[in-house]
Image: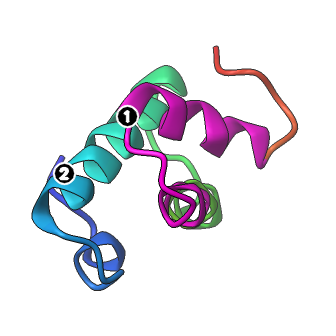
Amino acid sequence: MGLLPIFLHAGFDSEVTAAMGEAFNLACESLHDGGQPEIVRDTIARQIIKVAGTGERDPKRLCASAFEAFGIERP
């Protein structure tokens, strides 16, 4: 899956953008993303951006933060 435009325009350098993209892909794979509603994917992306803004750079922790937005632990 390519980088979402929301990540490309979030104002981070290429290394952080790549980490956010990896986190997003991990989250979608964990959900067995076969047609999640767009709002789910959008919420995941926005949460990853929010946490990356605090300085987090680890894709696995960024991914886990996305699930926290839904009140669940990462599958």
> Which residue sits at x=48%, y=55%?
55
Residue 3 is marked as none
Q: Between 11 and 46, which is closer to the camera in this rendering?
A: 11
Q: Quadrant of residue 67?
A: top right
Name the residue furthest front: 55
- Which residue is rendered at x = 76% and y = 39% of the image? 68
Quick check: 47 above or below 34?
A: below
| Left or right of 10, for residue 67 | right
Secondary structure category for the residue under label 1: helix
Report which residue position mark 2 lands on. 18
| Tags 1 and 2 touching, CB below 8 Å | no
Q: What residue occupies the far top of the structure in this picture?
A: 75
Magenta span of residues: 47-69
Assign the magenta stretch its main secondary structure. Answer: helix
* Mark nearer the N terminus (1 vs 2): 2
Mark 2 is on which residue type?
Ala
Quadrant in which the C terminus appears: top right
From the image, tell me which residue sits under label 1.
59
Q: CA distance from mark 1 to mark 2?
A: 9 Å
List x then y, in percent, for residue 40: 63, 56
Q: In the rendered structure, does residue 1 fall within the stretch colored magenta? A: no
- Tell me which amino acid carries mark 1: Pro
